[in-house]
Image (cartoon, coloured by chain):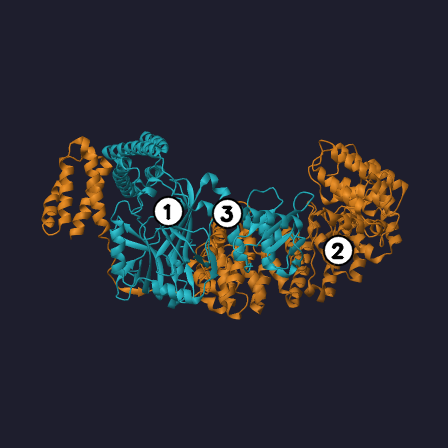
Amino acid sequence: MNTITEAYVDSLAPNAGAIKNGRDLVRKNSFPVRCITEDRTLLFGECKGSGKEPYRCSVDFIQENSPVFRCTCPSRQFPCKHTLGLLYAYASSSSSFEIKDIPAEIADKRNKAEKREEKKQAADKEGTAKAPRKVNKSALVKKIAAQLEGLAILDKLVLQIVHHGLGSIDKKMIQLIEEQAKQLGNYYIPGAQAALRELLLLLREDGDREASYGDAIEQLIYLQALVKKSRAYLEQRAEQPDLPMETGSTLEELLGHAWQLTELRELGRSKTNTELLQLAFLSYADHASNEFVDHGWWIDLEDGTIRVTRHMRPFRAAKQMKEEDSFFSIVQTEELLIYPGERNARVRWEHARYRPIDEADYHKVKQLAEVSYPDVIKKVKNQIKNPLSDKMPAALVAYQSIERVNDDTYILRDAQNKQIPLASNLLEAPQQPPVILGLLQPEELRNQAALIVFRHELESGRLVAQIMSIVTDRRLIRLLY
Amino acid sequence: MSVELLQDLQQEVRRLFIAGSALAQGDLRIAKLQPQLKKLGESAPVFNRIAEASDAVLNAPREDSAVKLLELATLLSAVLHTQGKTETAGELQPISSESIELPTDMPYRRLKPLLELLTTKGQGRLEQLRQAVQDGVHLDLRALPIMCSALDETFPEIAELIAETIRTGYGESALPILRQQINLQGGKGDARRLLLIEQLAGSEAEPLVLEAAANGSVDLKIAAISTLGKYAQHEPLLLEMSREKRKEVRQAAFASLASLGTEAAFNRLFEALTSSKDRELAIEPTRSTNSTALLERIIKQAELSFETYMRSDEGKERGAAIEQLNAELLCLHGTGTVVSTRHSYWHRRINRSPASEALSDAVFTLIQRLLTTRDFIVPETEAVVENAAELLLNMNTEQGNRLLLELPQEKSILFIGFRFRAAYRLLPPAELFQAFAPILDEPASNAARELIHVIEQMVSEQTHLSELDTSTTAQAEGWDSRWIHAFVKADAVLLVTLFAHKSDRVVTEYLLSKLGKNASLHHHLDQRILFALYRIGCKETPALVLGLLERRYYYYSDDNIQQLIALMPRSYTPRLRELAAKPNVARPEELIAIADAMEAAPAEIIEESGPSLWRWIRSKLS
């Protein structure tokens, strides 16, 4: 069985509340009965509950990397706080667990689960010869017609706003736009709808309207480009419904399509034998699409590509969904599925193994860093000049030093003395990066690598970057989470 | 230069977006930029495209203006995104870094809640903070600066915990940040920072501390001064601070002068003690010096104050002398002493003063003078007299106790208490009873009430009684057995419950009569009565308890109520279960749990009964 550490148990928990509750249970000595089977594949025990009878809970490691949580408590969350507590108890004092035989009821459940798995595998085997899902042509054409209608509404609205001017937008106008945004929900273009909501958030700015005009204009440019490109694409698809979906650009996702893993597989967008190391993590609330986003930046240890994981949890369903978290092991997956994207394509995986990070990995990462700033900058500019592109590309760059110019500007400097100016306001970090930089060891500010995210600053005309993490020979310094 | 032109154009485009594309036709300012654009277009085709696009805007009819403006804006934005500057002119300077050895290994789901609670207000943060610190979440480089900022927290308990954590968890690593953050003109948060810096940096912090003491805000001055009592070289500064305008600053200076212990320091304290302005402030610092030399001077001074009082006629001089004398006497007690005030229920807290005890003869002589001068014992001097008597009582010498016993009771009600306490020490229980019980014959008199009050206080001191534990009693030995009947006669119900040890018809009847119509298991006094009834073996007690349970609707069960139920004989458990089944009983499961535990108690424990049975039952219930 994997070594059970506190960090491992933390990673299994669906949210921070479960972590706290699980730990509290151990602290209050709520587990009078704790056992482990001799082959060490099952942890089981009893937990004092609020009722008369204690709850019986267990964690089954018969499949090492997918533990099964079972508990008699009424909670619908898995793992529940009782199973988490049992694991925390094991992590802190495994010797307090008695060696006992597997209880009959759990042995029964294992049997049933095995039988189910066998049945499924047999069915799968038969099913692999199945052809890919058939596209219902007439339904598709109907859908595209609706999407085009929605885009037309959006187009009209955008032009109307530009025509009247941002300065004249009053409460009434905002209400109108809100109504339209709601309406767009009926036209199968959730991505466009979210983009319109973004604009609304900018226009509603109670504070400094002046400051947000620049962003509002960029958002209008984006909306117009989205409408134009989508129209061309959808009209083409309407004429030839058999055409596969567009994967050369992110257009489908921008419109709002949620790629299924099976679709990505069918399109051959997968990579085998990948090792990923998480370099940075951030979780934030997106009020335009009404969801929480858990965003991870990872580096592919093979070729240095910076890949991104994005886990969305709609506000309404957030409580039932598992939160993601900072990750401190190397992910090894046989099948990495890659979404259509640009420099930092989104990825997902279904099965993975984990191994601990060691210094050799940090060396490797440093070697994968890009050394020439003009090259990186050129590639970044090439991406962001496109109105529909990801406007905040990430890159791992090597630096000879992090320094200050003119007292208030921080910069990265490469081996050829080329600079990248640094900013602190692109992403919400726990602390302003300069504060953390001032606490590091001097050698960490020289000859290391940094994961940075770029952005073009409209007002000043500069291309700036924010440091998300620093990779040294011995550790990863996270300036985000 | 060409980029500037584009940025100018960008500004105009922005203006039109704000004003509305409807006004774009023929816009003069864009028109002005056209020639330059076209000229640059000769060498770079992209400028041509931009020139064409802006032409289109200038010439578009109103209904097309939005489309054209957007096209121009899109093109312009795309070009400008490729022109972002990345070089900054100027001299490169290295960043100073403090080499703090802390990792950044805390995952988001553990770190974020800590940062949240440090930067927002809300309920329950103290406990959450304690938990997070216990789990080591703060040991992350990202948390360090935020913890230090959180010293400005308004909730004192949270701020104190943060200060403690910084001191023990981060230690010297926090110094650079604390030094950066501290503002010598700040408030309590900065005062905490100063204290931390002093604790962590030791003598290196001295310049900062001295600066704060001399020029800081009041909070900073007080904090700085409180650290200065260690070295003789700080004496001049402390003496200066002891004359500052603000009272709190002087107070802090006196405290540090007391630690310093030099001759000049003690002289200053003495001076303060004998001034009307600083008399009050000087008392506690004087106590903390534990200096017999200083106390000798004070005792002599007290004699002078006494003489001044006796000599003066009515008026200010007399009043001043009394206050002076009182202050001097207060100095003879130990640190932290609070002499009881008659009008509140605070327990006296009279602490020992080793220095006074070393001078016990001199102290005795002084107090003897005070207490045996008949004309001195008047209402005006009540505080001083009480003070003096407390002092003597606390020193507990044979001659002191005898003197107290001789106090003229008729002169002041207070004396009853002192005489009684002294007598308790000197006389055997039977004599004590004979000497004082007659006072209770007139239960309504002030004297009787005072006596009852004093006995209650004494029992509470003897048994460390707290309100919450209503089942404790006075120690049986040391008290004559006739007291309880005297208490019954005097209707001192609390004392009766405290002294009830064995079966007695009179006591039982009395207690039963005191459980009035409005008796309730929530009232502490009623609880005491019931415990007493159990103790003396009154057979009706279980029924009484059950009756009270049935009568009222209990929202909670405190330890005492549970214990009262658990003391019932086992035969009562069915009736408890019956009661639990009734609809308006809150928490029936608690009643059932108690009944279960009572039935499950093994025979040996029941035989022992009393405290061990209760402990057994209680362990089953938690």
- On what subunit does the disc labeled 1 rest? A
Q: Is residue B327 left or right of residue B604?
A: left
- On what subunit does the disc labeled 2 rest? B
Observer able to see residue B154: yes
The hue in which chain A appears in the rendered picture of the protein: cyan
Tell me if mark 3 has few (under 14), some (14-19) or many (20+) residues whose alpha carbon lies within 10 angstroms of its own.
few
Have a look at marks 3 and 2 and say if they share a chain.
Answer: no
Tag 2: residue type? Answer: Leu
Residue located beneath label 2 in the image: B371
The hue in which chain B appears in the rendered picture of the protein: orange
Please say if the residues under marks 2 and 1 sit with CB atoms less than 8 Å apart: no
Q: Secondary structure at mark 2?
A: helix
Q: Earlier in the sequence, mark 1 or mark 3?
A: 3
Picture coordinates of residue B439, whole percent (x, y) = 84, 45
> What's the distance in space between the residues labelled 1 and 3, CA to CA?
22 Å
Tag 1: residue type? Answer: Glu
Q: Residue sitting at 67 percent across and 65 percent down?
A: B296
The label on residue A122 is 3
Picture coordinates of residue A373, whole percent (x, y) = 27, 60
Nearer the observer, disc 1 or disc 3? 3
